[in-house]
Amino acid sequence: MTHIESTQGDQVTLPEDYFDPLPAPGLYNVLEDAPDPTIGQLTESLDSLRRGDDTITYELVWLGDVLKAVGHLTI
């Protein structure tokens, strides 16, 4: 996070909102054809995290969506 802060500043702006996630559990079975991607939205993941209206397990998935997008800023 120190690197992100030094390259992006105190606030991070994600240039993209929509992404193609592969639905679980199929994304973990690499020996079969990949499942069809769905459409994910970072703002929806962030809103869901802010509301905290689901189980902690799925909140980790939403957090993962956001962290992956932040990590891609440095590529």
Image (cartoon, rainbow, N blue to C red):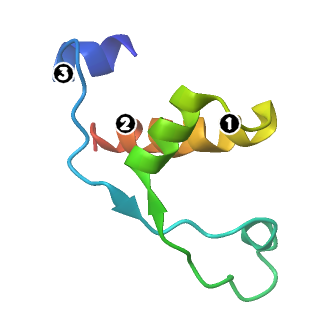
Q: CA distance from mark 2 to mark 1?
A: 17 Å
The kind of secondary structure element at disc 2 is helix
Q: Nearer the viewer, residue 9 or 42?
A: 42
- Front label number (3 vs 2): 2
Left/right placement of residue 38 relative to residue 57 reads: left
Quadrant assignment for the N terminus: top left
Q: Which mark is residue 24?
A: none
Q: Which residue is mark 2?
A: 70
Q: Nearer the viewer, residue 13 or 70?
A: 13
The three-letter amino acid code for the residue at tag 3 is Thr
Left/right placement of residue 18 relative to residue 50 reads: left
Q: Which residue is mark 1?
A: 59
Q: CA distance from mark 3 to mark 2?
A: 11 Å
Give the number of marks. 3
Please tell me whether residue 5 is drawn above or below residue 21 in the rendered image: above
**Residue 29 percent coordinates (x, y):** 82, 73
Q: Which residue is mark 3?
A: 7
Q: Are marks 3 and 1 in contact (CB under 8 Å)?
A: no
- Front label number (3 vs 1): 1
